[in-house]
Each structure stands twice: as C-alpha cells, then as structure tokens.
Amino acid sequence: MFASAQLPQTLDKSDFKELEPQLRDDLLKAQLEMIERKDFSVIILVDGLDGAGKGESIARLYGWMEARHLVCNAYSEPSKEARQHPPFWRYWRDLPAKGETAVVFGSWYQPILRARIYGELDDDGFQREMMKVRRFEEMLANEGVLILKFWYVLPADVQKQRLKAIEKKKAARHVLADWSTLKNRDKASQTGEEIILATSKGYAPWFVIPSEDAEYRDAALAQTITRSINLKLADGTAKQVAAPPVVGGLEKRSALDAIDLSASLDKKTYEKRRDDLQEMLSEISDTKKFAKRGMVLVFQGNDAAGKGGTIRRVIRPLDPRIYQVHPISAPSDEEKARPYLWRFWRRLPRRGHVAIFDRSWYERVLVERVEGYASHEEWLRAYDEINSFEAELVGHGYLVCKFWLSISAEEQLRRFKAREETSYKQHKITDDDWRNRLKWDQYAIAAGDMIDRTSTRDAPWKLVSSEDKRHARVEVLQTICDRLKEEL
Amino acid sequence: MFASAQLPQTLDKSDFKELEPQLRDDLLKAQLEMIERKDFSVIILVDGLDGAGKGESIARLYGWMEARHLVCNAYSEPSKEARQHPPFWRYWRDLPAKGETAVVFGSWYQPILRARIYGELDDDGFQREMMKVRRFEEMLANEGVLILKFWYVLPADVQKQRLKAIEKKKAARHVLADWSTLKNRDKASQTGEEIILATSKGYAPWFVIPSEDAEYRDAALAQTITRSINLKLADGTAKQVAAPPVVGGLEKRSALDAIDLSASLDKKTYEKRRDDLQEMLSEISDTKKFAKRGMVLVFQGNDAAGKGGTIRRVIRPLDPRIYQVHPISAPSDEEKARPYLWRFWRRLPRRGHVAIFDRSWYERVLVERVEGYASHEEWLRAYDEINSFEAELVGHGYLVCKFWLSISAEEQLRRFKAREETSYKQHKITDDDWRNRLKWDQYAIAAGDMIDRTSTRDAPWKLVSSEDKRHARVEVLQTICDRLKEEL
C-alpha cells in the first residue's frame, strides 16, 4: 500500500516560502472557527517510522496554530497509575474537549506495533487488538471527535542515514522507539501496512506522509488537517472525512509517475518471450494444483491503453472451458437494484477457473468518483469494501492479479486519432473517450489514490507501461506466470 | 441477555383475532409502499431454537404480505456449485432487488453456530467469523438493504415437548438442524447469545422473539417488520432501525415483571444475615487476590427504590481507602464537551479498589432516552458501546455487578409522600421525581430493553425487589459476596 509514499515527494524551499502564508492562514482560520463553534474536537495521531521528523513536523504545526487550544499527549511505557487501570484509561483521560485539538504521540497503536514486531502477537491476537481500536475510534467519531491519523514514511536509505545521525547524538536517542532499529525496518513497514489496512476507516482515516523532504511533509500535514476540519465544519454530522491525500496547492507524485514509459521490446524478442510465457501459462493452468485454486485478473488503465489486446494474449493459451472474460460497462437494471459488488460476485469463477475483468469493481473509485456517479461517502468507503472483497477471494484460494496499463496523454491522443481514421476501429472511440480525456488529471489522481489504498500484499497492483504494447503484453504474462509459480 | 424472552409472552386467541386485520393492513401497506418506491430491499433473517415454529411463523407472514415480492432462501449444506466459490457467494447470489423482500432460513450464522456447538471453532476463530459477518452486513446496510434478524426462543421445557413431538413425526424431522438436540440446548442458547452480542448493530439489529405462544410470536414478528420498514421509508438514509422490541398494540412482559415484589425479611433475620454478609465482604475485600482485581458496582432502579440506603450497607464493611461512591447526575460542562463515556472512565477505580456508581452510564438508555436528551441514534448505539465498555472492565480483571432495584408504583407513591412529610427527607423529593413518575410506563419499557440488551454473561444484571428494603440490602450483599467467592 501507499506506493506513492515511497517516491521522492518534494517541495522547493522557495515554493514552500511562497505557499506558507496561505497554509498558515487557512489552518488557523479553520482552527479558530472550530474553537468558536465548539462542535467537535480533533485528535491528530502521529505515527510511523522513526527518523521521519515527526517531532519537528509537529513543532512547526505548533507555530502555525493557536497553541493555547492545542495539547500534546505523548505516551510511552504506562505509568504505575496507568497500569492500575484498563489499557485505554490513559487515552480516555486525555481526550480533548470540543473546540480543542490534541496531538498524540505514541498512541494506542504503539503497544500493538511493538508487540507485533517482537513476535509477541500472533495473527488472531493482532486482529483482536485491531477490533478494539476500531471500536474505540468509531465511538469517538460517533461522539464528535475528528480523528486524523498520520503515518510518516521514508525510503530505506534515507532512514538509515537519519537513524545513524540520531544515534550519534546521545541526547536525541530517547526520541527513538526501542523497536525502531534498521534491523526491524521491514517488519515495521509491514506491520504499519497491516495496521493501516485494518483501521483506515472513513471515520478515522490514515494519511501517509512522505517525509524525506521536510517542506513537503509539513505542507502535506497542514493541508490535510485544514481540509478535514473544513469538511467537518461544513457538515457536522459527517463521519466520513476526506481520505485521499492532499491535492491542489501541493503537487503529489502518484505511483503512476514512477512508471517507466520508455520500456519497449523489439518484435523478435517480443514474439519469443510471448510464446515462451504463453506455453508456460498453458502448462501451469492445466495442473491439478491449479484446478484446486482459480484466478481473478483485473485490467484497468487509461482509455486506449490496450487492455483488450493484452487480454487476448493472456487467454490464448488457456482452455476455453476454464476462463471467461467479463467486460464491465454501465450496470444493468438488475444490477442497479442490488448492492454494488453483487455484479462481481455473480461473475466469480469456480475453483480452477479464471475470470478476467476488463474494467472491474474499481470503476467505483475511478469513473464513478470522477463523474460523480458515486457519492463522496460511497467511493470513500469503497476502498475498504474492495480490500475486504479481495481478501475473501484470496481466502478462498484464488490468485488475484491487478494490472494498471498506463500510457502518456500524447500516446493516447495518437491512438484516439488512429482509431478515428481506421474504419474497423471507429467503434472503439466514442464521445465519452474524448470527454474523459479532458479530465486526465482528475482520473490520474483517482487512479493514484486507488493504487495507494488497494495495493495489498495479497492482491497487489502491477503497474505496467503500455506505451509500447509489446512490452505491456509480455510484462503482464510474466507477472501472471511468476505469481502462479510462486503460489502453486 | 434477553431475559424478557424467557418469560411467557402470550396473546389471547380472541385478542389476536381482533388485532390481526390491523397488523395485516399495516404490514401490507408498508410493503406496497416499499415496492412502489424501490429504494431499498429487505432481508428477514430467521434463526434461533428449533421447535419454535419458525416455518409456521413465516408461512403466516406469507399469507399477510404480497407474496409475489417475497422470496424465501433456505440454506443448508452448500451445494457442489457453492463449494466451488467463496463461502458468501451463495448469499450474494440471492440478494433481493430493491423493493423485494427475502426471508432467509439457515443464514450465514448457521455454519458458525454449528461449528461453535461442535467445538470446532475456538474463541479467536469465532471472533474472526463475527467480524466477517459484521463487514458483510454493514456493507449491505450501506448499500440500502434493511436487515432484520429474528432469534426465536422457547423455555426449555416447552422446547423439549416440541422436539419430542417433531421427532415422532418422521416427515418433519428434516426441519431440524443436526445440532438442534436437547443435549445441545444450553450450548446453542449460549452461542446464540454470543452471536447476538457480537452482531446486533444499529444497522442490522437482532430481535428476540418469544415463541411459546404462536399468536404472540407472529404478531411480534409482523409488528417489528412493519415498524422497521416504516422507519426506513420515513428516512431512506437511516441506517439505524428500531432496536427495541415491539410495544404499543402488543403488550410485552419485560424482565422487570418477573421480579417477585412480595419478598421480605423480618428484622431479626435481616440483621443476622446483613452482619454475616458484611463480615464476609470485609474479609474478602482485604485479601491479596482482591488487591489484584477490583470491583465496579452499578446501582439503578426506580426513584425512591432505596439505592442510597443499600449502597451504605455495602460500603460499611469496606476500608474507606479502597472505595469511592460516585453519584451521577447531570454532566458538567467539562463532561459535556467530551465523548459520553469519558465521565465514567475518569472515575474508574485502581486495581484492588471499588467504584460504586449511584446511577451510571445507563442513564443514556434510561432518562436520556425517555426525556429525549439523547437522540434515537445515540441511545440505540449506546447498548453496544456499553457492552464494549464493560467488556474492557472485565478484561482488566474488575468484577462488574449491576443492580436494578425495583419497587411498585404504589410503593413509590407511599415513599414520595413520606419524604414530603418528613422534614429531613424533603430534600430527597423534587418536582423532577413527580414528573418522572408520570412516565412510569415509558421508564419501564426503557429499563426492560436495557436489561434485555446489556445483561451479559460477564456483567449480568441482578434484578432485586426493593419493596422491602431489608430484602433488597441482603440480596445485594449476597450477590456481591457470591460473585467474589466465585471469581477470586
């Protein structure tokens, strides 16, 4: 999850200087309005990897906000007094009053994170703790607390440097959690992902903050807080707050930006690799092991990215009796009359079969979000619903592979024009395509959020450049074969 | 839980005959409006003990409703086709369209119930399954499905007779679940309670239907469905539906009605038993074992039932350093500014200490419900929040004992008058008391619902007749001593 957070996200110092007065103004205005109205309180949870500058970041926040209505609660080992009471007692004790804001360091997630990293908490125990946390946060949200949770991340090499620097300065060592060593980094990242997956709810969302660049980090933090308070001020009963990361004044690099669009294959190499991979896929899909499993393939991407052509190369080696391609367009009347995911449940494959979705349940957070067919509340909760849905598929034994086929805006234009000029391709280009193209940026944001929030360990997104179709086809075939070999 | 469901609830055949036309009319009208509007679908889940007449009850429902928009889905062992798909596939497949109603027998709860009764599902596994069910139902509710879940219950002896009768008729045997034997009755009841506790949510509540009397059973079913559909029709976005059982046209006996108000003690017996019990309490509360635990006592009851006097007898044998009495009245400004339970969290005892609440968090579902200080949505979700809260207390090692002190309306009147006439007691009677008394019936319903929905295995309500104060005091002391001896 949150692939985009691994990309370097930066903000020039000079740009930041320019942006800062507005950021401060907006944030302070929102806070003052909230203090005035006394309708709700705000809890800002600060978590994530050490070395990311969490303290520094909050110090800047203090400078920007009205500090008399801001308290900071830092928890480490429970005091003797706290140990005499149930675990959540100390967090309850410190809940801010309406109009007030509390910044929480070392929150209720820390003991869980710590125990999980040290292997003291098995899967069931972890899920139990997650349930308790969800109940706690849901109750707070129901009672008018705006809960904003920030997870600070850093690329591995940057974190390494920072931790070394901190360890040199004796005085600073105390700011490190005891589990926050480089040795535990992978485990910590993985646990963080599990936690975010289990507890990022509409009523208490996680925001992942890329923290390599201090200016970007703090601007993102401030902007997210401002937007969330304003949303809550606008609709006091809204329990859903804006899940997606900052946009607008801040340019965020999405996971899509990291796709190398220059990748290509010459015809000969392509044909050789394609044939080899198709042969392999044919063999694996004919095994007894595969007959006990099943596969769900999802294809999404820019219009004209070549989903259809890629799918044709995937199905060629498969026995026609075991697969079905499901092109997804507007829902039928029957489908509209039922819960959203019903249309996909009815198309699930039997064991040992393959269902290929040309567009899918992800349309809810793409076209339905951008075009307003789904309400804000609907598409926000869809991330969590989709993750649950796919977890059920994985739990049943299916392999779930999701592909995002990416092309540049220029390449899309070329393909659209080519379609218009070629008679047998004209049916493939519609007014809708041109209309959607005008919203390229909005679709890119939606796709970026989608990948950040639904690329899970068990059902990851594979981002594929389709600027060169041969490259895309081979990449997709390769990914499927790799997953099959790994899992069977 | 649902103590009231164990009481014989009956409706005379002649009363039923009189009531029936109205019941049918109301139900059909609600259904037709729903068919016309096509805003949501209804799922009626039918579960509970065998022999309660679930089939018979639904058959009558069919006679009352427009059957062309009613389907019945009965699930037993999954078919070969169903086994090829994830477990929830068959339930998804059969989801009703908007405007339609589905009656579900052998729902997603059956495999869990069965595995639990046969000991194939440990606590963690059970909680995992409960989480899946909650996610599923929450998603359906979010997508516009009205989910009504009915749990049919019978007193043990009645069920025994019925099962014997069914077993004699070979043809009818197939209607019994394989685990539904008398031998498993206790386990089944207990599991049912666990399930109801874990999955009775505002968006998908359980209704317990006392089924000894077929007329009462079916009238209660029809009335609950009608009321829930009408609520949803009135506010399409309402995800909370009416949790409390039927009232109004149907008279329901609440758990309070089963209290024997005639119990009394003569002075000599009282003094002897009181002294013995206080001695015992003094000893136990001074042990090392107790020092590691702690106790939370909750006193609720009718006005003038004698809570204060009873509490004084409980604290007398305790070391003043280890207990504190918390009289709960209107919240302070500081408390109003924070989530509801904050005021109780801050009053929790340390380990080895005793907190005595003279009125408590239950005021939310009593006075706040009746007087409208809490919204419908707030007091409905409070049952679940309170159960979670008390589970945290129990999990920390506290003993949680809750007492409802009950007196008759006549006795209350006598005591009110006595208070007015005795100068040193005048401060104990206010206009509020007289006002509340006018709402005696509403308070009784609220108290009955409270006991039904929050009397859990770990934190049960003890209903005590306080018509005779001596009896009440001894009964309370005895209960506390018994619990302490049992748990330490």
Image (tube, coloured by chain):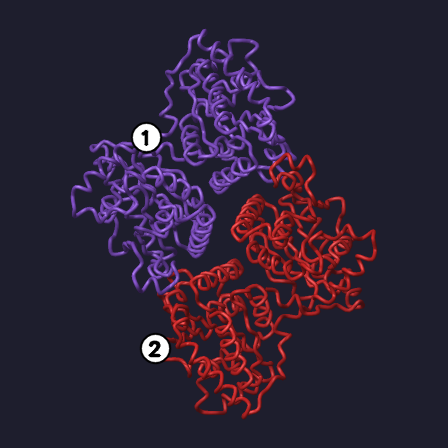
Chain colours: A purple, B red
Q: Position of residue A80 (x, y in %)?
A: 30, 63
The answer for which chain carries disc 1 is A
Residue A7: numbered disc: 1
Viewer-closest of B187 and A24: B187
Task: Say which element carries label 2.
Answer: loop
Local crowd size for mark 1, using a 10 Å CA cut-off: few (<14), some (14–19), many (≥20): some
The answer for which chain carries disc 2 is B
Q: Residue at x 43, y 24 (%)?
A: A438
Task: Say which element carries label 1.
Answer: loop
Distance of mark 1 from mark 2, alpha carbons?
59 Å
Q: Is residue B215 above or below residue A64?
A: below
Q: Residue at x 62, y 67 (%)?
A: B3
Q: Residue at x 56, y 34 (%)?
A: A397
Q: Report whether residue A70 is seen.
A: no
Relative side of B158 to B130, left or right: right
Q: Is residue B391 above or below residue A272?
A: below
Q: Position of residue B124 (x, y in %)?
A: 51, 51
Local crowd size for mark 2, using a 10 Å CA cut-off: few (<14), some (14–19), many (≥20): few
Viewer-closest of A331 and A232: A331
Q: Is residue A40 above or below residue B6?
A: above
Three-letter amino acid code of the residue under disc 1: Leu
Relative side of A321 to B56, left or right: left
Q: Position of residue A102 (x, y in %)?
A: 31, 54
Asked if badge 1 and badge 2 are on a common chain, one would say: no
Q: Position of residue A198 (x, y in %)?
A: 45, 44
Query: What residue did someone put label 2 on?
Result: B321
Three-letter amino acid code of the residue under disc 2: Arg
Q: Residue at x 45, y 75 (%)?
A: B358
